[in-house]
Image: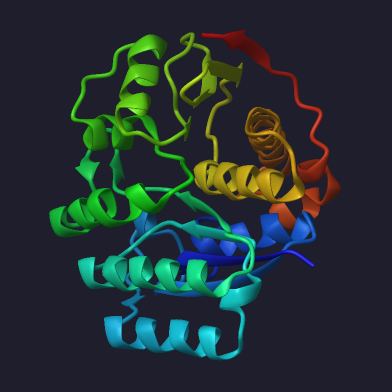
Amino acid sequence: MPLALILSSFVAASRIGGAAQQYVLAAHRIDPVLAPTVMLGRNPADGSRGQITPPDLFARMLADIEADAIFGLVDLVITGHFSSADQVEIAADALTRINAAAERRPIVVVDPILGDEPDGLYVTSEVAEAVASRLVPLADWITPNLWELSHLSRREIGDAASAVAAARSLGRPALLTSAPARPDEVALIYADADGATLFAHPRLPRAPKGTGDLVTASFGAGLVEGLTPLAAAERAARAASEAVHAAQTWGRPELPIVALGERLVHPTAALRIEQL
């Protein structure tokens, strides 16, 4: 039975971060284990003030997970939000131990949660530097948003071609969210050394937060299930569109991840697909 380890935030009332990713993975029959880096009641963008997991406690949580022999069973590791550079260092060390314990090396997907438009960084510069230097090199795939890709690559990105070039400069295959596309579209770009593909769907008003977290978890699930990376990226794009449409119907500011169920696993949302 597949098992995933998530190192990211826990937000009780909002479908964002690692807590939301648990539900996505469960829909794919992948057992999630979440080691929270911070605990909040709701989205911090709405004014929530939570509690950062102290590095010593974060290290003890991972040691307890390791003591239960879970490190040797992990098929997928997702890293997301970190609140301190010390947490990033602890996560990097855990990845090394997981690789040593596992009979088959797990898939590592790093979502470098650093910031976004229009405000830029919403973690400290020390966290951003640690993610870039310690976690990105350990990743099999990265899933940055457009701003994060520009920050990591130190490049200006104005169109799909420059986004692909920026992703390739990091030396890791990437699934880019909030990618450049037509004005009325939301897009993902998958880019590896051999090719690049854009997946776009119509932009809807008032899209809930958390679609990037959903995309990362859906993409990781697809890789665990044995889909090709390109097929996993396409399904993740369809799942994100499916979830945003469902949220519009629900009329709530959150993604109805649990209610979607099989619609996340077998999404049918239409996409415009373009080879780059």
Note whether 103 is above or below 171 in the view shown: below
To which quarter of the image does residue 13 belong? bottom right
Quarter of the image with the N terminus is bottom right
Q: Is residue 270 visible?
A: yes
Q: Position of residue 49 (x, y in %)?
A: 32, 71
Q: Position of residue 128 (x, y in %)?
A: 22, 52
Note whether 31 is above or below 62 in the view shown: above
The residue closer to the viewer here, 84 or 172, is: 172
- Is 28 situated left or right of 85 in this image? right
Q: Seen from this angle, which residue lies furthest left?
A: 125
Note whether 240 is above or below 71 in the view shown: above
The residue closer to the viewer here, 252 or 40, is: 40
How many numbered marks appear? 0
Note whether 209 is above or below 56 in the view shown: above
- Is 231 situated left or right of 15 in this image? right
Q: Position of residue 107 (x, y in %)?
A: 57, 53
Q: Image point 36% across, 27% down: which residue?
A: 167
Q: Position of residue 225 (x, y in %)?
A: 76, 48
The residue closer to the viewer here, 102 or 159, is: 102
Colouring method of the image: rainbow
Q: Image point 53% across, 70% down: which residue?
A: 12
To which quarter of the image does residue 149 belong? top left
- Is 83 situated left or right of 23 in this image? left
- Is 241 situated left or right of 163 in this image? right
Q: Image point 45% across, 28% down: which residue?
A: 178
Q: Is residue 113 visible?
A: no
